[in-house]
Amino acid sequence: MSQLRFKVVEEAYDRKAVPVDIPNERPEQYYGKYVFNRAKMYQYLPKKTYDALVYAIDNKEPLSREVADSVAAGMKQWAIDNGARHYTHWFHPLTDGTAEKHDAFIEHDGKGGVVEEFTGKLLVQQEPDASSFPNGGIRNTFEARGYSAWDISSPAFILDKTLCIPTIFISYTGESLDYKTPLLRALNAVDKAATGVARYFDPSVKHVQSFLGWEQEYFLVDEALFSARPDLVMTGRTLMGHESAKNQQLEDHYFGAIPSRVEAFMLDLEIECHRLGIPARTRHNEVAPNQFELAPIFEETNLANDHNLLLMSLMSEVARRHNFRVLLHEKPFAGINGSGKHNNWSLGTDTGVLLFAPGKTPQGNLQFITFVANVMAAVHKHNGLLKASIASATNAHRLGANEAPPAIISVFAGSQLADIFARLESSTQDELIAFSDKQGVSVGASQIPEILIDNTDRNRTSPFAFTGNRFEFRAVGSSANCASAMIALNAAVADQLTIFKENVDKRINDGEPLNHAILEEVRKLIIESKPIHFDGNGYSDEWKEEAERRGLDCETSVPKIFDAYLRNESIEMFARTGVFSEVELHARNEVKWEMYTKKVQIEARVLGDLAINHVIPVATRYQSFLVDNLVKIKSLFDADKSNLIVAQDLSTIEKISKHMLVIKDTVEAMVDARRQANRIKSEREKAIAYHDNVVPCMETIRYHIDKLELMVDNEIWPLPKYRELLFIR
Ligand code: ADP
Ligand code: MG
């Protein structure tokens, strides 16, 4: 068995960087080559069609059948000119990743041959057989069909000679079966609500966009080593493995020189990204060995999310070209950092103003404080929901572990913002009135006109941090679809802004001056949302106790964290913003619980197999070697001499026996716990049983396997060790 381990280690050691096929042109020339962007539309569509399509995109209006036909014809021509043979509706089901079903462009020509055709009907809507996608019972209750419909706000692209058309995926009765539908709804809601508030400050504002800049963390592992680890292959993480003597203590990997094999991979990936219009810009080593990050320039949220999903599939593909496997799991290795996907998020007007950036004028700064205070209030009210939006079986290994934000949502504001909050909170009525009457005069909130937020004021322990002109939602997991977090956040903020506007309007109707009305409401928000504001060390134990006292959601069990979606305040908020109906919320939670159960179930099976088939036999072999040795020593030496050696060996043999015994017993207990959990009908209760009864068995089994790894002869240990997985590249 160990033969295999040494073979793959050798293979990995010998591997050289794969040369990258670098285009002769500069990125400016090939950027967006495979995207049907406005330039391509202009080139391939009749002027009238182009105008109608751009109008529909900009005004979020549906296309007429005629225009759709004309767009389809142009799009097909462009796709064929770029070597495409197939097309697919590309959507985001409630599983991980994306779904696609390819169709060739061909139709019968009536003469025994074919013509390549693509109609508006095929472009705009399809009825994929959706029966095997998770739907939480929606389709069973109503209709078995699912529809995918073109999202014109995200451009079509060509991937592997296939024209991909970004679509939403809904049931016959209109319930969303995907991530994109509710995301678009949430983005519309925040547009409407934020525009209403932004107009207090600039009546010419027509739209507010939500922006997302994700930072994708990932690990790379040599493919030979990867293949020799069934746990990595099946579950994306190592279910066992003792820490290596050196890991990240020296912090020598972060921002260190990028190894040549990895650099080749990154360059190749960037070129692919740029061809597909993904504005990849930043790349660097992360904290853990073999951990890296890629970040693009931020974009409108829906597009940014499509790009992240596309990136994740590109990464896997390009990694294989370089004989790597990319690990997007949140915690592939115990004892070192896991991977997240920071979601940098902001709102901006169509007049070009970022609403979380301090302005240059008193009015601009009042606007800034207004929006920031509303975000604080929204995050405070819905902190449990926001946690639920990033919770998953895989992210659970990262949250609350030492490098990641804890399983409590709080907002880091930074000293300057905190100072402004404190002053606004305590300023007198007169000061506020004076401020609102004489804009810019130094009273009460006098520092507002001068705000220049220091970008270096960072706190890496906060799950939700203000970082100068945006908020950074850091608790998002590396394998997650960002839409989940973006739906909850944008919807919660939309709802909060709507309530805020109602309150301000009421005051204005009662005769209060505008600025005064706004400041009073802002002050109320700052006071109410104080418990969510925490600038201290989020990793400390004191914070957990403090957060509990402040009434923040401190639940750590993922299946129970999901309950937040079904609390009244969430159901009502999602109904008011039109993002989710109650039916959808219930259905989606069923899916979440089911996914949780399945993930743990698969891991438990793999671990059980590895324990019984890989580890126990090897430990037994080593043990019997020790026993042989012991017998020989006894026969060779007289008792006096042999006693010491015998005692030592006996103790090792005994330890090995104990570990093996615990492993065998716990595997049995785990199988039993699974059997019992599987009998439970309710998906929620089943997931809880898996969490409460199966996961702890896995932890025990792992602990004892890792102990054995240190004791058993290195020569016969079957699986590549952490020091091999993490330090060979
Ligand atoms: P850091 O690691 O220091 O947080 P990075 O440069 O790695 O920063 O990533 C920052 C991300 O935030 C980038 O994707 C960037 O485009 C994005 N970003 C910058 N400003 C905004 C903004 N106003 N709204 C949304 N995202 C933003
Ligand atoms: Mg960051």
Image (tube, grey):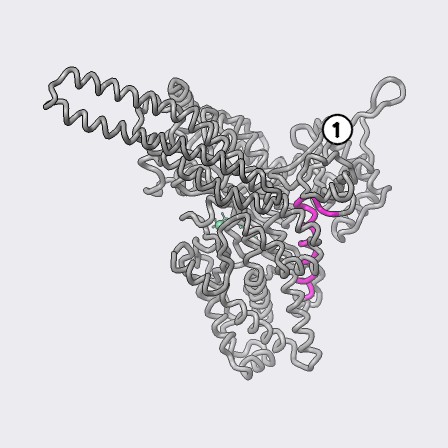
Q: Nearer the viewer, residue 594 or 93?
A: 594
Whether residue 194 appears in magenta in the rendering, the answer is yes
Q: Quadrant of residue 346?
A: bottom right
Q: Quadrant of the N terminus?
A: top left
Extreme residue in the bottom direction: 430
Does residue 476 appear to the left or right of 34 in the view shown?
left
Location of residue 364 with respect to 253 vertically, above or below: below
Residue 152, percent from left and from top: 74, 44
Please tell me which residue is depicted at 65% across the width and 28% down the height of the picture: 160
Q: Is residue 52 above or below residue 131?
A: below
CA neighbours of label 1 inside 10 A, class few (<14), some (14 to 19), many (20+): few
Is 343 part of what is drawn in magenta? Answer: no
Residue 573 coordinates in the image, percent (x, y): 66, 60
In this picture, residue 54 sits left or right of residue 692: right
Q: Which residues are magenta?
A: 175-196
The answer to whether 547 is drawn above or below residue 268 in the figure is below
One can see residue 308 in this view? no
Q: Is residue 515 above or below residue 348?
A: below
Give 639 or 82, whichever is nearer the viewer. Answer: 639
Q: What residue sits right under mark 1 in the picture?
A: 103
